[in-house]
Amino acid sequence: MKRHLNNIRLKRSSILLVLIAIALHVNSQSLIWTSSTENNTWIESTIKLEKTAIITPVLEVSGNEDLLTFKAWGTCFNERGWDALNMLPRNQKETILNQLFSADGDLRFTMGRFSMNANDYARDWYSCDEVSGDFQLKYFNIDRDKTTLIPFIKAAQEYNPDLTFWISPWSPPSWMKINHYYSVVSNRDFNKLDPKLDFILFEDSEKKYDNLFPQKLAVNDYFIQDPRYLSTYANYFCKFISAYEEEGIPVRMVMFQNESWSYTPYPGCAWTPEGIIRFNLEYLAPALKKQHPEIDLYLGTINTNHYEVIDEVLSDPRMPETIKGLGFQWEGGQILPRLREKYPNYKYVQTESECGWGSFDWGAAEHTFNLINHYLGNGCDEYTFWNAILADDGISGWGWRQNALIRVDSKTKTAIYTPEYYAVKHYTHFMLAGSKILATKNGKEDKMPVMVIKNPEGQFVAFAGNFNDDSKELCVSLSDRFLNVKLQPHSINTFQLK
């Protein structure tokens, strides 16, 4: 009798376990659907996966694909961003830092980029050594940074002590350049460069390239191609890295120049392929190897769609032993797929999300969502956003209005979360380091970008946009189930298993 009762209890337990397993399986087929439109952001609902497809799936994944393992989301630290943040009351400032950098915050950034010397969102031009002819770098210092960038970075580190960082200059010290000025070209409204010096950029070259950026290429390196200058500049990088390390800010990656192909009235420096090869391979790489062997040297930031220029640089047989990866932004993203196909052994990263023209509108959100899909879908395992926060119309010291994820009203001392903030959150909140990108579809033809990943817990997450003027049906095949859904017009969506 006792044995009979035990058998009954065992059967009941087995049945209960089966029922629990079935319940768990059914529950595992439910997704949390987070959707945002221009006037209604971050709305959560529940949707179930189905056994049949309502239309042909745009993507089919089994879960065993592995296009890429994602590493990090990041943002840039700029002086004008720090000024904007400090306009806010302390409690709101702390809230924003938590939302940007905490592991349980909204955007969860784990990486930061900052400029060596001034960039276009510095208050004005400066470098760490403006003493002409200081080849010993006797007067090198980061005193300016200690009042702006370093406090900004340390404030972020309070919320994420494990932040990693990478650097690039916009311009070398002015005395190291052939025009002896921080910009490449003159502009009577925004700088004091003698217009006569603009001639050295192209000289008498009339050659133009249709549909390429820039339409005309610089014929001269703006950095003085003299060994003494080149060697000093390489040491300058090393001193900068060491100075920041002393402040508790470790740099892990270096790129030699921001946008070599932007011939700007704000801080910049034009380089030719010959100069890029010479400085990176013969000066910067050896200096880093000797003084900072822990640093990865990437070629960037590449902002031109002149494929032949970048191919010329990468074709140097010494390059694979020296350069670990490539960084792309703006027009450079157009040649990313072609370069990655020819040079598959490099690491690829996105280095600056496009900042627009100060519209702060839903169109900027859709544009950024598309950019993320493009860069991650084409092999970039890191993505860096530009302005996290700016004040008012987002204007730089050189007259360019730009977008930001958060906009501060300097009169009311309040923060406004822009549409782009939510577009970014739709990705960064769910795609953590170690996520596997399984499949992507760009939205060039149908305005419906889609991406499917497997997060570190092994769950599917899907990202989808509908940037059409009417609702659209979407179907994605996830293993043996289907995500069938109708997306609202001009909506951004994330789907995650409960």
Image (cartoon, rainbow, N blue to C red):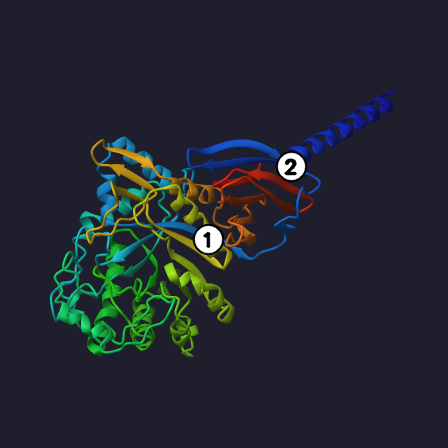
Q: CA distance from mark 2 to mark 1?
A: 27 Å
| Amino acid identity at mark 1 | Lys
The residue located at (38%, 43%) in the rendering is 420
Q: Residue 334, percent across and down?
A: 43, 62
**Residue 209 placement, left or right of 478:** left
**Residue assigned mark 2:** 29
The residue located at (71%, 33%) in the rendering is 22
The residue located at (48%, 46%) in the rendering is 432
Q: Marks 2 and 1: CB-CB under 8 Å?
A: no
Residues 247 and 432: in front is: 432
| Amino acid identity at mark 2 | Gln
Residue 489 vertical position relative to residue 169 in the rendered view, above or below:
above
Q: Which mark is residue 71?
A: 1
Residues 431 and 208: in front is: 208
Is there any visible trace of residue 135 in the rendered image? no
- Counting residues from the N terminus, which is met first, the one under dot 2 or under dot 1? 2
Quarter of the image where the C terminus is located: top right
Q: Residue 36, percent across and down?
A: 46, 37
